[in-house]
């Protein structure tokens, strides 16, 4: 736990997006369908907008702060509650003040504007409580926990946090020099873009039909196992991509990348270097990779973390169970 | 030395990391080879045809002028000249500027000669060649040759006024360390850092680094956005500026261009942060001295 040189309330700060209004050219307006906003996942999916030319989205939100504790202890004055919308990829930062509702300052509400030109992929929305403490103005005395932040997805058409694997099919023989060099391979991974993607080789007979099949039990068993294997490949590949492309501070401290690569590292590191804070874990993995030794020892852990994320054990267990059932049906 | 590309298409394009990797040879990184421009352009992904901002010649002319103007000086001096003019010529949104493939294309397809001229290191004693770091071609926004200039102009300008960006780019330490920090995403903070340089409160690279790290560390417990709120950004001004790109004249060479007509930051807010940061800096200096300068 972090230690602060001034008193902070213990109660949690939470936030909730309650409505989203989009604005387009010529003052066109649209209210985002309530389905575009998930309170459970804390995600807003702006890809659900009916107009595709929207220019800005106004998020209406309510924050709950430990008002009673703040009032009772009396260490804090000039309380302000602010919503902060940021995205690392575009260095965007928008701040809006919230205002206390009628219930004695527990719920604070307000609106924050997201300008589409300022964002690329996913923005996060946090709430901070700020006060004057011991004569110092602008102290942050409480914030939404990192895992309680909201995510505003600019393109998703469903409000979910985990992303589906982007699988597309393409003929490797006719897909340009790079893909041609992979002829004969069933699939290749592309981790260079904004999001990792799997390119299926449509020249590989039977593969596309299998992956797209809804049909027979045998095929669907094989498909699930194959997809789990691909997901595992993707997790391992993006981990390597991310760890190989870190920005390093002058003192040698590696930084978490601002985009999905950072998210991947944060998610996998606890399985790779268990029981260590994320900054330490990142430094450990980085030093091992850059030649201090022990990079090879880490590979099984990376593979383990990738397989876990890809739910390979579950896919295999399900497959065995289905095969068993199939056998019984055949015998009967 | 690496030369300007033999073939220059009419329009700017995108190139993915994977495609680009094939053209970043060891010879290019040592400034001994050129980029095979026709092959590179075949691999590039074209952008919409009707966009007046994507004329390649405008960017190439500007870069030529930068190299001519600073021919007899240290190449670092070109940063402060090129950053605002590149920003004003391209007129990108942040969403567009976040596209890494765009900057990679500018580096490889438009001006690899500039990348080499600007970033080739001095040859070391045991090695006949200097080198350009790979991240000057493909890299994060704080490293890539053109992305860092564009982002510096974007984050340090005060609405239409590029002067603060010129000051920030005039100091390599400010440019290198501040661009990596999230605190400068708050505009009054960025402008206050510039003011402290202009007033001479911080002068040397070491002082600039001490200041930026003190400001960044303090941001863990202080909300500068509440101490000095920025005005609400209005996307309309930027959209108008972008719409005017087709009819815009080439960026002026002898005086500063003007950016989008966005509202400027409140001077009172910036001054408040200037005072605040000056105190933080003084504290950091004292601590640095008592701990033997190890800070």
Image (cartoon, rainbow, N blue to C red):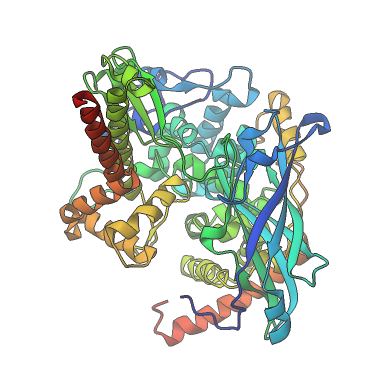
Q: Residue at x 45, y 84 (%)?
A: B289
Residue A239: where, in percent of width, then height?
A: 32, 47
Quarter-wise, where is residue A320 in the image? top left
Answer above or below: position of A130 versus B84: below
Q: Nearer the viewer, residue A296 or B36?
A: A296
Residue A148: where, in percent of width, then height?
A: 56, 59
Q: Is residue B92 left or right of residue A97?
A: left
Q: Is residue B160 left or right of residue A238?
A: right
Residue A99 in sight here: yes
Q: Nearer the viewer, residue A113 or B197?
A: A113
Residue B63: where, in percent of width, then height?
A: 52, 34
Looking at the rendered structure, the number of numbered marks drawn on it comes to 0
Answer above or below: position of A124 versus B101: below
Residue B179: where, in percent of width, then height?
A: 52, 54
**Which image quarter is the N terminus of chain B in?**
top left
**Which image quarter is the C terminus of chain B in?**
bottom left
Q: Nearer the viewer, residue A231 or B119?
A: A231
Q: Residue at x 29, y 51 (%)?
A: A305
Q: Residue at x 37, y 67 (%)?
A: A277
Query: Farthest front residue?
Result: A332
Residue B21 in sight here: no
Answer above or below: position of B133 versus B34: below
Query: Farthest top residue?
Result: A174
Q: Nearer the viewer, residue A264 or A246?
A: A264
Answer above or below: position of B293 versus A173: below
Q: Is residue A251 left or right of residue A114?
A: left
């Amino acid at each position: 736990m972090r230690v602060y040189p001034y008193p902070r309330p213990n109660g949690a700060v939470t936030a909730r997006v309650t409505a989203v209004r989009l604005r387009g050219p010529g003052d066109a307006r649209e209210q985002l369908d309530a389905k575009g906003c998930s309170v459970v996942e804390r995600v807003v999916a702006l890809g659900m907008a009916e107009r595709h030319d929207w220019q800005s989205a106004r998020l209406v939100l309510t924050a709950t702060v430990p008002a009673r504790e703040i009032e009772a202890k009396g260490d804090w004055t000039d309380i302000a509650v602010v919503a902060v919308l940021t995205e690392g990829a575009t260095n965007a930062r928008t701040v809006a003040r919230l205002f206390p509702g009628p219930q004695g300052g527990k719920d604070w509400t307000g609106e924050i504007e997201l300008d589409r030109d300022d964002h690329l992929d996913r923005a996060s929305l946090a709430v901070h409580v700020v006060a004057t403490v011991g004569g110092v103005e602008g102290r942050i005395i409480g914030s939404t926990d990192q895992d309680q932040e909201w995510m505003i997805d600019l393109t998703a058409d469903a409000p979910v946090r985990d992303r589906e694997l982007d699988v597309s099919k393409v003929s490797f023989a006719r897909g340009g020099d790079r893909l041609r060099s992979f002829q004969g391979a069933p699939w290749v991974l592309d981790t260079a873009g904004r999001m990792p993607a799997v390119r299926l080789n449509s020249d590989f007979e039977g593969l596309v039909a299998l992956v797209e099949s809804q049909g027979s039990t045998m095929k669907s068993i094989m498909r699930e196992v194959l997809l789990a294997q691909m997901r595992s490949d993707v997790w391992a590949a993006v981990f390597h991509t991310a760890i190989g492309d870190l920005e390093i501070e002058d003192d040698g401290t590696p930084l978490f990348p601002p985009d999905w690569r950072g998210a991947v590292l944060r998610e996998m590191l606890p399985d790779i270097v268990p029981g260590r804070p994320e900054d330490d874990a990142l430094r450990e993995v980085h030093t091992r990779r850059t030649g201090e030794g022990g990079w090879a020892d880490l590979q099984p852990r990376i593979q383990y973390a990738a397989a876990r994320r890809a739910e390979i054990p579950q896919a295999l267990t399900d497959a065995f169970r289905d095969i068993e059932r199939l056998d019984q049906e055949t015998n009967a | 030395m690496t030369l300007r590309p033999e073939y220059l298409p009419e329009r700017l394009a995108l190139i993915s990391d994977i495609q680009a990797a094939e053209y970043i040879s060891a010879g290019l990184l040592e400034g001994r080879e050129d980029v095979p421009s026709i092959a590179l352009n075949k691999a590039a992904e074209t952008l919409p045809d009707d966009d007046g901002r994507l004329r390649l010649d405008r960017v190439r002319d500007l870069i030529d002028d930068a190299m001519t103007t600073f021919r007899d000086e240290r190449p670092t001096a070109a940063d402060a000249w090129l950053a605002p003019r590149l920003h004003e010529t391209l007129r990108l949104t942040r969403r567009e500027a976040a596209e890494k493939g765009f900057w990679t294309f500018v580096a490889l397809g438009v001006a690899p000669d500039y990348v080499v001229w600007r970033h080739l290191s001095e040859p070391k004693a045991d090695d006949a060649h200097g080198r350009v770091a790979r991240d000057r071609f493909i890299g994060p926004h704080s490293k890539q040759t053109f992305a860092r200039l564009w982002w510096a102009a974007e984050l340090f300008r005060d609405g239409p006024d590029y002067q603060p960006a010129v000051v920030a780019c005039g100091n390599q330490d400010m440019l290198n360390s501040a661009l990596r920090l999230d605190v400068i995403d708050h505009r009054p903070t960025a402008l206050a850092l510039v003011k402290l340089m202009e007033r001479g409160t911080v002068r040397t690279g070491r002082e600039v680094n001490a200041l930026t790290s003190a400001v960044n560390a303090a941001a863990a417990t202080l909300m500068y956005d509440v101490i000095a709120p920025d005005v609400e950004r209005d996307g309309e001004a930027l959209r108008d500026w972008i719409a005017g790109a087709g009819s815009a004249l080439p960026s002026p060479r002898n005086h500063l261009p003007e950016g989008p007509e966005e509202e400027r930051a409140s001077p009172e807010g910036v001054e408040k942060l200037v005072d605040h940061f000056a105190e933080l800096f003084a504290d950091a200096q004292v601590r640095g001295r008592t701990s033997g300068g190890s800070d």
